[in-house]
């Protein structure tokens, strides 16, 4: 296991505070990043260091890989903890960290990619012998197939888009006529 002396938390709010607290318990220095409106936020105040990364819009700050990587390099952090949301499910960011010699505290890029596709993820865990709940083994062909499978499983069911993340593309179907 690599020796981590300083972690940059590429997030804000409660998750950043939790990571900062855990790092401090382990004797690891912390770096917070912040956008303009977050300048006086608790995560910035509790971190050992902080780096301004942009304006209010996350597309101009927390989601800009170059700004996060630059902050890591400027502060000498060994690792990045992405928290959740923002860059945490971005395989390209995890891969970029690897290429830059930065420890990414999270899944490997391949795992992020596979888990982003629910059908591929289910196929992988099934192949590994990990139990899965009742449901499809592959993508649906049409609504009729979905209805037939739902009748077999029993209602209510959760319908989920294969590529939907963060709760997007989910819908509970309580009975057949809701399809």
Image (cartoon, rainbow, N blue to C red):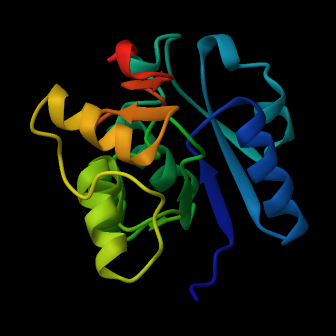
Q: Is residue 75 visible?
A: yes
Position of the C terminus, as image quadrant, is top left
Q: Nearer the viewer, residue 124 or 5?
A: 124
Q: Residue furthest left?
A: 141
Q: Residue furthest right?
A: 25
Identify which residue is drawn at 71% across, 19% down.
39
Identify which residue is drawn at 42% across, 47% down.
153
Residue 37 spot, x, y in % from top left: 65, 10
Where 65 sits versus 37, above or below?
below
Residue 108 spot, x, y in % from top left: 37, 68
Left or right of 101, for residue 71: right
Q: Nearer the viewer, residue 141 or 47?
A: 141
Where 42 sits versus 177, above or below?
below
Q: How many marks?
A: 0
Left or right of 147, for residue 76: right
Residue 80 spot, x, y in % from top left: 53, 56
Where 77 sits versus 131, above or below?
above
Where 83 sits versus 36, above or below?
below
Identify which residue is drawn at 48% across, 59% down.
133
Q: Residue furthest bottom?
A: 1
Left or right of 178, for residue 29: right
Locate residue 98: give its quadrant: bottom left
Identify which residue is drawn at 57% across, 85% down.
2
Q: Nearer the viewer, residue 69 or 173?
A: 173
Left or right of 169, for residue 88: right
Q: Is residue 96 visible?
A: no
Residue 25 spot, x, y in % from top left: 90, 66
Position of the N terminus, as image quadrant, is bottom right
């Amino acid at each position: 296991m690599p020796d981590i002396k300083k972690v940059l938390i590429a997030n804000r709010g409660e998750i950043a505070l939790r990571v900062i607290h855990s790092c401090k318990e382990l004797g690891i220095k912390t770096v917070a990043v912040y956008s303009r409106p977050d300048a006086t936020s608790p995560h910035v105040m509790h971190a050992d260091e902080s780096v301004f990364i942009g304006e209010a819009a996350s597309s101009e700050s927390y989601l800009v890989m170059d700004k996060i990587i630059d902050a890591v390099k400027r502060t000498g952090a060994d690792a990045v903890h992405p928290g959740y949301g923002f860059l945490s499910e971005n395989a390209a960011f995890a891969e970029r960290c690897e290429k830059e010699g930065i420890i990414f505290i999270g899944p490997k890029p391949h795992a992020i990619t596979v888990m982003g596709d629910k059908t591929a993820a289910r196929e992988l865990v099934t192949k590994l012998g990990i139990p899965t709940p009742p449901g499809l083994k592959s993508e649906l062909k049409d609504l009729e197939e979905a209805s037939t499978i739902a009748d077999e499983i029993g209602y209510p069911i959760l319908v989920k888009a294969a590529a939907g993340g963060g709760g997007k593309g989910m819908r509970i179907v309580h009975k057949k006529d809701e399809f």
